[in-house]
Each structure stands twice: as C-alpha cells, then as structure tokens.
Amino acid sequence: MTSADLVTSASPRRHNGHSLTTRIVIYGLLTLFALVYLVPLLVMVMTSLKPLGEVTGGNMFAVPEHLTLRPWVDAWGEARIGVSETRGIHGYFLNSVKMVIPAVLISTLLGALNGYVLTKWRFPGHKLVFGMMLFACFIPFQSVIIPMAVILGALGRIGVDLYDLTGWSFGLGNATVNLVIVHVIYGLGFTTLFFRNYYENFPNELVKAAMIDGASFFQIFRRVLLPNSTPIFIVTVIYQFTNIWNDFLFGSTFAAGDSAPMTVALNNLVNTSTGVVEYNVNMAAAIIAAAPTLLVYVVAGRYFVRGLMAGAVKG
Amino acid sequence: MATLEIAALRKRFGTIEVLKGIDITLEKGGFLVLVGPSGCGKSTLLNTIAGLEQISSGEIRIAGNDVSHLHPSKRDIAMVFQSYALYPNMSVAENIGFGMEMRGVPRAERDKAVAAVAKTLQIEHLLSRRPSQLSGGQRQRVAMGRALVRRPSIFLFDEPLSNLDAKLRVDMRIEIKRLHQTTGSTIVYVTHDQIEAMTLATKIAVLKNGELQQVGSPSEIYDRPANTFVADFMGSPAMNLLEGTVTAANGAPRVVIARKEGEPIVLPIPASADAGKLQDGARVIFGIRPEAVNDSESIDRNARSVVKFDATVEIVEPAGSDTFVVIHAAGKELTARMRADADLRRGQNHTFAFNLDKAVLFDPQTTARI
Ligand SMILES: Nc1ncnc2c1ncn2[C@@H]1O[C@H](COP(=O)(O)OP(=O)(O)OP(=O)(O)O)[C@@H](O)[C@H]1O
Ligand SMILES: [Mg+2]
C-alpha cells in the first residue's frame, strides 16, 4: 500500500526521468559486474580448449585457433596428480561426490530436525541450545582442526577394534567417512539456523491439528513439516553443497593421497613442481572442479533467491 | 452423565495463572459457547480440553473418562481451528482422511468415510484440490469435514468463522446450527461474535481474566446477567446501567434515579430483583436493555410494569431495522432501541418508557445481581 502511495504521489514526469537515470546506472553496474565475473570464466574455457603451444605462445584473450578437447581428456584421465600413482582427477572427483552427497543430506536433515524441535517441541533451555548452535557458525575452521584430528583418531582406533571383532570397521577410520563426519558437525550450526528460522513462522496450528489427528513426533515431521519446507530445503542444500564441495582445509588435513577430495587434487595438479605447467589441462580441471556447484546454482538458483526472500519478508 | 465435565481446572503459564478454577459441565448434544474479552483464556480453555495444553490442576472428563493427562488423539475430540490448519501439501481428501490414516484405518474404509462427509458438506467436487485452490468458505468446510469424519464425543471450535466475510459468516453459522441439530453432536465453541453466541448456544459461559462469570442458557445470560460485567459484555448495544438509590418511604420500596435536571425517575423494584435484600438508602445499579426503553406508546403492550419519563434526544442512529436513540437521563447516556421509522430529532423533548419486566438491579459494591 505504501509503495502504491509513493508512486501515485510522485509526479509522473519526475518519476520517469528519475527511473531512466536509475535504470542506466543499475544496468551499467550490473553489466560491469557481470563482465568482471564472466571474463575469468571465459578465459578459462578458452584456454582449456587450446593446445599447450597456443597457450604459452599466444594472447590469453585470443579465441582458440585449433580447438581441442585433449586438455579435458588429460585432466580427467591422464594428468599426473602430485606424487600419486593413479592418473587424472576422475578418482578425486568421485571422492568429492561420495563425500558431498551424504554430508549435505545428513546435515540438512539433522538441521531440519533440530529446527523442528527448537520451534515446535520447545523445552526449558531451548534458547540456550539454539544460542550455542548459532555460536557454532562462528567458530573458525582452523581452531577445530586439532581437536577434530584427535576425535577422528579415536574413531579410527574404534574402527580397528570393530574390524577385529566383526570383520567390518563400520566406515570408521575411512577418510571419506571422516570428512562426512567433519562436515556434518561443522554444518549443523548453519542448517539448524536456517530451518529454525523457517519453522519459527510455520503455523503451530498445523502441528496441533496433526497431533489431534494422532500423528507421532516423526510422522508430523515427515508428513507435515518436511513437505512444506521445499524453499528452505533447497537453500540449505545449495549452501551446504557449495561449502562442502569447495572445502580445502578439512580435505587437505583429514584426507591425504588417493582419498583426497577434488579441491585438494586440483591444488596438487596445479602446484606440481615437475615438468612444464600445462595451463590448458589445469584450466580444464578447474572447470570440472567448479562444475557441480555451478550446476546446482543453475538448477536450483531461483529457489535459493526465493527462499532467502521468503525468510526475509516473513521474519 | 454429562459428555464434558470440567472441575476446578487451573492453568498456569510460568507464574501467570490464566485459568483460575473453572467448573463447567456440558450434557450430550449441548452447544457450549465460550465468550469473553480478548486474552481472558478462551483459547487456553479449549486447548486444555483438546489436550494441546497441559493443565496445572483440576480434572477434565469426557464421556465419563478422565482425560486430563491423555494425548490429544486419545481424547475422542476433534478441533476446528481459526486458521483452518489444513495441511497445504495434501489434497482435500487426504486432509480429511489423514487422521484415519494415522490410526491405520484401511484405505477402502477411509475413502468411504471421506466420501460420506464430503457429501454432507457438499464438497465432493473439491476432494482432489489443494487447500490453496479453495476459497475461505470452502476451506472452512474442509476443516469441518476433517472434524466430522472422526465422529468424536466433542467438537471443539476456536473462532471458526472469524476469517470469513459477513455474508459467508451468516451462511456458515446457519450451517453449523443445522449440523448440530441433525447430528446431535456435542460442541464447545469459542467466539467473539455476540450473535453467534446467542443463536448457536444451548449454554453460554462468560469468562473474564480466567474466571467464570456466569454459565447459563442464552436467555438467562441475556435477561438475568449475573453481574454488571456480563450485562455490559453481552448484547449490542450494551445494557444501560444507571446508578440509583433505594427508598422505602411511603410503603413499598422504590428505586430513585436522580437526574441533573428535572424530576428524578422513581421506579418500582423490578420483578427480577430480590426485594428482601434491599435496604432503605442502599445504592444500586439499575440495568435495562435498550429494547426495553422505548417510546411511551410503542412499549411492549404485554409489559406488566411500565414507567414513563421525559428526556431530551441526544443522538439518533438509524440502523436499518431499528433506530438507536441516545438520550440523556440521570447524567448518563441511555440507549433506546426504537422502530426504524421513529420520528425523533436531536434536542427534541420526548416521553420515553421503561419496560420494567426486563430490568435488573445490581449491587454496586460486588457488581452482582440482586
Ligand atoms: N504459551 C503461553 N505462554 C504464556 N502465556 C500465554 C500462553 N498462551 C496464552 N497465554 C496468555 O494467556 C492468556 C489467555 O490467552 P488465550 O489465548 O486463551 O486468550 P483468548 O481468550 O483466546 O483471547 P482471544 O480472544 O484474543 O483469542 C493471555 O493473557 C495470553 O497472553
Ligand atoms: Mg483465542
């Protein structure tokens, strides 16, 4: 109503003149920033499609003369990664996929469950618990590395004992499992924050109606809360996916050698100290490393914006 | 045996006592309406009956069983919420059938029950829609369908019509009344709407600050309010309350209402009052409904006790079916409900009359009716 009032009260001419300059400034800035962000990507794509000679000899902004997919094939299957025996980044890519999917799903579902309890099943001290979970969002990565290493070491020893007892370590001690554990714990503060704020505005009467209908704690969660959480679910998945996929510190600390995630492998590939630097292969590998997060944004980005907006307006 | 018995019910939120000892019984097929100002505890009372709020002390019995500490789903109740609380992700049919699904009723039986309820409420054509694709009135029906399908001992309604527009509200009110009469169900109903309360209830309970002021039939509440709060709260426009004094001079006791200008109005003790309790010189509050104040010619012909007085017209409010006339009497404004075509103008001096059959007296100290 207020915006309508503003529009009608301003004189039409002034309004138009005003909006034209504004438009020029807005579109100018948007174009500028789009270029700033797109040019590096364009250079990467072009470089990855050139033979090495053209890269080292020519201009960075030049369009490839001899288009080739060789650098992509090399990056995926042939390139030497650090001192490892296995070649190409495909194994590490798979490591990242095996880490990111369970880590994202588990942390998101646990965050949703936390948000559900913190808003719909309040208990004495729920504010304190939420405050401490929020605090977890502000703990720097570096400060948890050593305690985390101690805990993972202990879990690894339990894994060995379990293996001796049962013939299966239950995944304890496995580097990918370790990374999943680390990312789930570290991400829980954020996912809880997202879901708690979303469920804060979720009508209590729906929960009460479901209680009268005889739904249990988990039935209410699964049948009433979760199906109505799509926007925040997507926001959380994107956020977690991006963070976990792009993580380097935990990956390089807790997963060495062949079990390293994509980010660590990319670093080892690029920072190699032997032979010539194959920029075209490096670029191809970098694009492969960035592709999943880009894909997630393209597929679900509009929900991301919508979810953030919904939270902002309702809050 | 009553279907609902509430005894000495208390509810505290932290240190704040919201319900301060409620005793109500409701017989089978009864329609209890809870009214009271905002924040008086109506919703809280309803929620404690439903089991959505734990009680601090007291007892709630439904159909003879103590349900005070049972889970809501085990209390044999169904509730209709103000916001309808339909599950947005489910179709109308799934919404109505959800409770049965949770109780493990087989699909075929569920579908049959849903179809039967949909037929009663005439929402068969909506069964596959989502709540977001329904109008307010249709959502209301679905919410009632979800309650009806359970066939509970007691239906609980928390201001179910307050989100509807005026016309639809009247339609749905009549529908609820019809449903109550045809199914003989037992209902507890919270509302802010005077007319809903008067038309639907077999029993009205007036709450104030978590305390029951009066429980009775609509006519008891309206004609014989237990205190000045109930008198003032029920009815629109509100009951006229005038201060007066009892005088026993010259034989029978009378109530004298002094006026700033002109003769005091002297009234015989209304039939409703217990004359034995009135002492000479005692102060009283004289209460009379606007419809018992009228033109001296148009006052109810069957009235046994009528007192006429002259007064000046202050405000004339034509309201379509009636005209409300505010007159100045006894230093206080007095509202009269008159014929729509009453020909009165501001400033005019006119003879009015009280129909004392409908009048009541209150004690100014305790505010209770005498
Ligand atoms: N969960 C709660 N915690 C603390 N106080 C509460 C809680 N729920 C209700 N109250 C208080 O209890 C009192 C009664 O609330 P209730 O909702 O029953 O009022 P109501 O009669 O239904 O009012 P309205 O007509 O506005 O719906 C209010 O003063 C309210 O602030
Ligand atoms: Mg209420």
Image: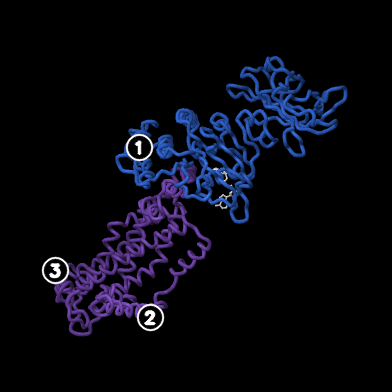
Distance from label 2 to label 1 (Cα)? Answer: 58 Å
Foreground label between 1 and 3: 1
Give the residue pinned by disc 1.
B114
> Quadrant for ligand 2?
top right
Position of A120 compared to A156: left or right?
A: right
Foreground label between 3 and 2: 2
User: Residue at horizontal 47%, vertical 50%?
Assistant: B71
Distance from label 3 to label 2 (Cα)? Answer: 45 Å
Q: Is mark 1 within 8 Å of ligand 2?
A: no
Neighbours of disc 1 within 10 Å: few (<14), some (14-19), many (20+): many
Q: Look at the numbered disc 2 and give the secondary structure of its residue.
A: helix
Q: Quick check: do tags 2 and 1 share a chain? A: no
Where residue B228 sits in the image (x, y, percent)?
70, 35
Image hue for chain B: blue
Amino acid type of the residue tagged 1 in the rendering? Val
Residue A69 shows which numbered tag? Answer: 3
Q: Look at the numbered disc 1 and give the secondary structure of its residue.
A: helix
- Proximity of marks 2 and 1: CB atoms separated by less than 8 Å: no
Q: Chain of mark 3?
A: A
Front residue of B366/A146: it is B366
Residue most extreme to the right: B250
Q: Look at the numbered disc 3 and give the secondary structure of its residue.
A: loop
Report the quarter where the N terminus of chain B lies: top right
Position of B347 compared to B14: left or right?
A: right
Position of B288 compared to A32: left or right?
A: right
Position of B194 compared to A44: left or right?
A: right
Front residue of A261/B186: it is B186
Where residue A197 sits in the image (x, y, percent)?
45, 57
Asked where in the image residue B249 lies, by quadrant, the reply is top right
Residue A150 shows which numbered tag? Answer: 2
> Which chain is represented by purple in the image?
A
